[in-house]
Image (spheres, rainbow, N blue to C red):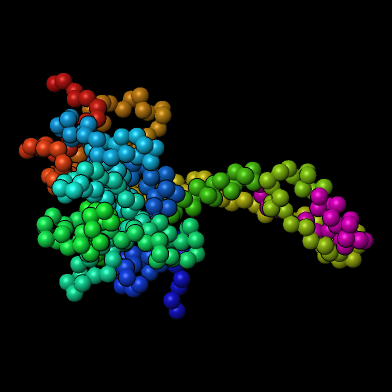
């Protein structure tokens, strides 16, 4: 029997399944894989910290050529200038969550690039594929996951041409749009892998660990809200009228305090003098001992955090987890070595991002000349003098 996948659960086992219908290539069975992975990361302290650290190392210290960082490439939603450095941050954030990014390219009448803007990864889907599995358009829409409404409205789809530098291809795109004024530009995209057409999120190999950490957190929160109370079953002889029962339960709830109303259950019955169920006015209380404590989760927490750090390119533990009491004794050399290791782990990602920006800016409307878009690796800690 097929099981319906919803955004409120993590299905098992997860596979990216491409299904071509309705003019787009769906992203998993429910077409909401990016949203589900983003929720999974944001719901796990370790996964979110790992994604943040991965993003930080991909950005590094910006482009080695400081002038490139300052190039204004567009406006944000508040009308403020955004720079190429900001665009680098957008690309890195999208990769840390989704292993890919999309940029909308804007052009002038000479078909020179005048601006670029990051598109939300979860909003983008490939349009209809040709016989070679190539898509000519990216469909941008903000309700694939149905968070904004129960229906997918094709009338709100924004179909944008895929990035292509071939002059004949661009001319054909403009003609098909009905002229330059009606043309919506192009979308440049990059994925870390294309085994399933769309990329798999970095957290995917550790999705159960991320969910486990969230569930442990929810359990602890629930226990705290109940004050770590034991459970009680209170047996009471039958009340003469319903109002007496209501008043008794209200008094019991008031005695236990707010937030603990689910720590007891009241059942009516008859008992003998020894408290055994039998005829006679009496009250009997059964106590259900709480046999769960925080230590039972220590092994789970250790293993899940380790698995998630591995999923995000083997982040060294020192970069994610620390104790306040030990932070002052952590040497700069230890941080430096951890940083160097993680720079090695993320080197290919920075190279790929650099190549993408070199291609994106190769057609910039202002002559930049020959530029090196190498990203300067992040430096942590200090070396120990020998």
Which residue of the protein is positioned furthest toward the top in this rendering?
385
x and y, in percent, of residue 344 in the image: 17, 41
* Quarter of image, res 171: bottom left
Residue 205 vs residue 78, the one in the foreground:
78
**Magenta residues, start to end:** 229-250
x and y, in percent, of residue 243 in the image: 89, 57
Which residue of the protein is positioned furthest toward the right in this rendering?
240
Which residue of the protein is positioned furthest toward the bottom in this rendering?
1
User: Is residue 321 at least partly visible in the picture?
Assistant: no
* Left or right: 17 as drawn, with respect to 66: right
Residue depicted at x 38% and y 45%: 48
x and y, in percent, of residue 235 in the image: 80, 59
* Quarter of image, res 193: bottom left
Above or below — where is 367 with respect to 202? above
* Left or right: 145 as drawn, with respect to 135: right
Residue 28 vs residue 340, the one in the foreground:
28
Residue 241 belongs to the span the image colors magenta: yes
Residue depicted at x 56% and y 46%: 221
Residue depicted at x 47% and y 66%: 151
Residue 96 belongs to the span the image colors magenta: no
Above or below — where is 369 with respect to 252? above
Above or below — where is 148 with respect to 86? below
């Amino acid at each position: 029997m097929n099981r319906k996948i919803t955004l409120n659960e993590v299905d098992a086992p997860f596979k990216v399944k491409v299904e071509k219908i309705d003019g787009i290539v769906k992203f998993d069975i429910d077409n909401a894989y990016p949203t589900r992975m983003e929720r999974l990361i944001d719901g796990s302290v370790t996964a979110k910290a790992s994604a943040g650290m991965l993003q930080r190392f991909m950005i590094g210290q910006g482009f080695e050529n400081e002038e490139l960082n300052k190039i204004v490439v567009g406006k944000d939603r508040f009308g403020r200038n955004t720079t190429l450095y900001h665009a680098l941050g957008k690309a890195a954030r999208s990769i840390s969550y989704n292993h890919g990014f999309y940029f909308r390219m804007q052009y002038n009448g000479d078909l020179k690039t005048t601006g670029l803007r990051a598109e939300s990864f979860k909003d983008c889907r490939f349009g209809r594929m040709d016989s070679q599995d190539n898509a000519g358009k990216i469909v941008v829409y903000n309700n694939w996951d149905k968070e904004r409404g129960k229906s997918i409205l094709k009338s709100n789809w924004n179909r944008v041409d895929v990035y292509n530098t071939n002059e004949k291809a661009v001319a054909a795109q403009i003609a098909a749009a009905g002229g330059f004024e009606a043309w919506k530009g192009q979308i440049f995209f990059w994925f870390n892998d294309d085994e399933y057409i769309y990329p798999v999120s970095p957290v995917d190999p550790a999705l159960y660990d991320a969910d486990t950490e969230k569930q442990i957190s929810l359990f602890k929160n629930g226990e705290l809200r109940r004050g770590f109370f034991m459970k009680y079953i209170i047996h009471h002889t039958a009340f003469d009228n319903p109002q007496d029962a209501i008043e008794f339960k209200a008094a019991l709830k008031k005695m236990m305090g707010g937030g603990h109303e689910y720590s007891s259950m009241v059942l009516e019955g008859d008992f003998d003098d020894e408290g055994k169920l039998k005829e006679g006015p009496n009250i009997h209380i059964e106590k259900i001992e709480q046999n769960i404590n925080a230590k039972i989760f220590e092994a789970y927490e250790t293993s899940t955090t380790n698995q998630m750090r591995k999923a995000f390119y083997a982040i060294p533990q020192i970069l994610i987890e620390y104790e306040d009491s030990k932070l002052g004794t952590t040497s700069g050399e230890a941080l430096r070595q951890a940083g160097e290791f993680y720079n090695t782990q993320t080197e290919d990602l920075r190279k790929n991002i650099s190549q993408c920006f070199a291609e994106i800016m190769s057609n910039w409307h202002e002559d930049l000349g020959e530029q090196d878009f190498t990203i300067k690796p992040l430096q942590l800690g200090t070396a120990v003098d020998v």
